[in-house]
Image (tube, rainbow, N blue to C red):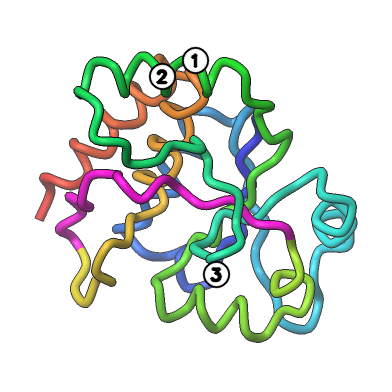
Amino acid sequence: MQIILLTHERELTRKTNTGRLALEAFPAKVVSIVWSRVAADKKLIEMLASQQAKLLFPNEDAELADDSIETGLPEDTLQFMQTQVIAKQVMPEHVVILDATWQEARKMLRQSPYLKTAARVSLPSLIPQSTFILRRNQQEGGLCTAECIITLWRQYGCDEQATVLASLFAQLNTRQ
């Protein structure tokens, strides 16, 4: 799975940009495209239109990244079932993540018709709360870019990459 960060231009200079961690550590798996309202990336538009790429963004009709549901079963049984479901899932070829603050991400979505109509995937509803402490005004239930990537990679069995990125994120998150 390739992660495509559609990066708001303001993120490029922010010291708290967590997408940068993934870009630097995994240049073959994570790429960045700077978002532009007036000059959208044509290749990205084609990939989204053909569903070669899917947008990671909360949405009622998005495909869940893990297809899990609450069942009341014991935790070890649920983990086993999730592992079986994930093993059978088709990993998206490309996942687009809006690399921006939540306010900027909503603006990007609102101002980009190709993003509004893109097929979406969303993270499971039972994910841990964000531990990101370096920015204020975080959206309830929202994750930063690195946390999204870590969660996706764990969902699709890329545990080694997820662990490395989680370590880098923890190091950044402790700097104040």
Mark-to-mark CA distance, 1 and 3: 36 Å
> Residue 88 lies in magenta, yes or no?
no
Q: Is residue 130 left or right of residue 150?
A: left
Is 14 located above or below residue 31 in the figure? below
Residue 8: assigned label: 3
Q: Give me the residue at 20% from left, 51% from top.
A: 129
Residue range highlighted in magenta: 119-134
Quarter in which the N terminus is drawn = top right
Label 1 packing within 10 angstroms: few (<14), some (14-19), many (20+): few
Mark-to-mark CA distance, 3 and 2: 38 Å
Is 89 located above or below residue 6 in the figure? above
Is 44 located above or below residue 13 in the figure? above
Sequence-wise, which precedes: disc 1 or disc 3?
A: 3
Q: Position of residue 55 (x, y in %)?
A: 64, 56
Q: Which residue is mark 1?
A: 84
Q: Secondary structure at mark 1?
A: helix
Q: Secondary structure at mark 2?
A: helix
Residue type beneath disc 2: Met
Q: Which residue is mark 2?
A: 81
Residue type beneath disc 1: Gln
Report if the CB atoms under discs 2 and 1 are less than 8 Å apart: yes
